[in-house]
Amino acid sequence: MGTDLVGRPFPSLTTTLTTTEEMSPGASPCDAVRALRLDELDAEWAPMVADIALSCEVGQGIEDEPDANTTVVAKLRPKAAHFGGAPVVEIRMSDSAWGNDYQYVLDARFGNARQRLSTAIRAHCLKNFEAAADAPDTVCRIQRDGVHGGLYIDTGEGGGLWVHPDPDNPRRTIFASAWSE
């Protein structure tokens, strides 16, 4: 069934030039970002990933400076990973100065997997936020998500964890970790 991703951090899928000297004059912020090659992935992730694609648009940063708004998609090998028992088929990661949205695309209908994904999202929260597994329900408390029709955990500081139906494919579910300014 592959690697269980509950509680694990999302992988690094891009690299950024660290100094402006590495960029040519007049370069776009998007010129400073690229997708990692498969041979550059962390050893834990390399066997799971089949392909990585990056798209980037220049947007407005927090202080009106140009900002790279990136979206990277990693297609996973069949049966390479799962989240709460649901196969993970893709990782989507969007980043900008205003926030990020990291997603596992699960090959399971939300309605069929809701209960086990409810357990998985709380376990993921507890592992990532160093809360005890026997923490009271007020820690990593699951709420209904009225926007996406799924479940939500508020992680503070403008962020949270979601599990909800994929709006683009009713046979799939999204697990997301996101924050915004």
Image: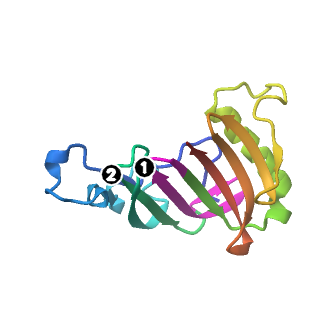
Magenta span:
80-100
Identity of the amino acid at label 2? Thr
Q: Which residue is mark 2?
A: 15
117 in relation to 63, above or below:
below
Q: Residue at horizontal 43%, vertical 59%?
A: 70
Identity of the amino acid at label 1? Ser
Residue sitting nearer the eye, 51 or 24 = 24
Q: Are marks 1 and 2 in contact (CB under 8 Å)?
A: yes
Q: Quadrant of residue 126?
A: top right
In the rendered image, residue 110, in percent from the top left (x then y), is placed at 79, 63
Q: Is residue 2 something that shows in the picture? A: no
Q: Which residue is mark 1?
A: 12
How many labels were placed on the picture?
2
Q: Residue at horizontal 21%, vertical 59%?
A: 27
In the rendered image, residue 22, in percent from the top left (x then y), is placed at 16, 50
In the rendered image, residue 114, in percent from the top left (x then y), is placed at 83, 57
Which residue occupies the extreme front position in the image?
64
Residue sitting nearer the eye, 27 or 176 = 27
Q: Residue at horizontal 63%, vertical 39%?
A: 158
Please identify the dominant SS of the magenta region.
strand
